[in-house]
Amino acid sequence: MNINNIFLKSFRIVLLPFSIAYGAIIIVRNWLFDKKYLQSATFNFPLICVGNIAVGGTGKSPMVEYLIQLLHPRFEIATLSRGYKRKTKGYALANANTTALDIGDEPMLFHSKFPDVAVAVGEERLVAIPQLLHDKPSLDAIILDDAFQHRSVNAGLNILLTDYSNLYTHDFFLPTGDLRDEWASTRRSQIIIVTKCPADLTDEKKNKIIRELKPLKRQHVFFTTIKYGMPYHIRQKNRRKITQNVEVFLVCGIANPNPIKELLLENAKTYYQKNYNDHHIFTIDDLQEIKSKFDEIDADNKLILTTEKDAVRLIKFSEQLEDLPLYVLPIKHQFLFNEGSIFDELVVNFIKSYPKVLADNFDIS
């Protein structure tokens, strides 16, 4: 462990009183919702929520993409996100002229990859959902991105993600830990997914984690690993494989770049890194700095690598990127233990049987 990590952990421990106060507020807030002193709205419509109870990257965006790919051939669906760090306010529905500044980087990623899927943003989901249904009255379902902790709306199906390397059972409230909600809130989910697992996760380790998470009988627990595709050029879309003779300059503005660094350690000759804050809005000065640092790398076989979320914030510099060897690394979830079909069936049946859901107080156990 390096000195910076030791300092950070020590500093966060000093903030323990603030975490206790924050946790107390969250627990009281949830109690008020549970006792109906604070009201949650229930829509007569299939809502699928993808979320977590911790800050940082657990793979929410790739899971939303997984759901789009699963559901779009069968149903007319839409995504609804808050639109974090966008320059606009209120409800907005993406169109052909929309940029990441209008709706945020993650919704823009969905819009660019699935242009025939309705992608909307709105800070207040209670307000945005009716507006989205008004704009797209033929929708069969809406995927709520990162909405689990926002209890103003009850989703019919809650998919909760937790990172294998930082399970919520090992965590504590902000700012000492990364939790933005209490452990008890996980009971509101129907599905729990442990993400970013080793591809060779054993049955013994799987069962140990399930025992630790202590799911309710009606909850389903799944395990996924990260699967990276072959990088493609941000403009020209040609693909290039990362091999042991390639030096990589990693440009990253996401919460947790560690899995990408592990990938490069295994596959590239060497790599260099330029970190930005999560959801960083790139400027032309940033691009010039990236070019300058890339030029300093003394190698014939080299490239710049970034994530898909970062790419939607860089594509605005279209002309400057045309001849730059800037490649984008695609990512997706892969279910372990051959359980992907079980997950798929649960989600599809939730939508298909929704009228019955309302009548029978749906339970997917």
Image (cartoon, rainbow, N blue to C red):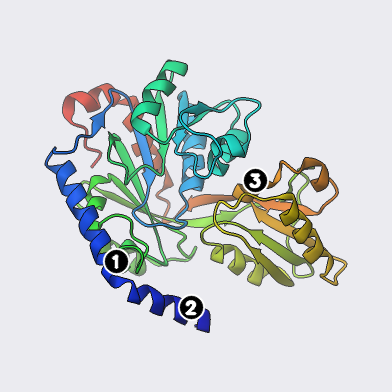
Q: Residue at x 61, y 67 (%)?
A: 261
Amino acid type, callout 3: Arg
Furthest toward the right, the residue is: 300
Residues packed near mark 1 inside 10 Å, few (<14), some (14 to 19) or many (20 plus): some
**Circle 2 SS class:** helix
At x 28%, y 36%, the residue is: 152
Q: Name the residue under label 1.
A: 18
Q: Which residue lies furthest to the left in this view?
A: 35
List x then y, in percent, for residue 27: 20, 54
> Do we see residue 2 in this rendering?
no
Dividing the image into 4 quarters, which one contains the C terminus? top left
* Residue 351 placement, left or right of 292: left
Q: Residues within 10 Å of mark 3 (few under 14, many from 20)?
A: many
Cα distance between the residues tagged 3 and 1: 34 Å
Q: Residue at x 25, y 58 (%)?
A: 183
Tag 1 or tag 3, which sits nearer the N-term?
Answer: 1
Pinpoint residue 62: horizontal percent, then vertical percent.
Answer: 51, 47
Question: For the residue marked with disc 1, what is the amino acid?
Answer: Phe
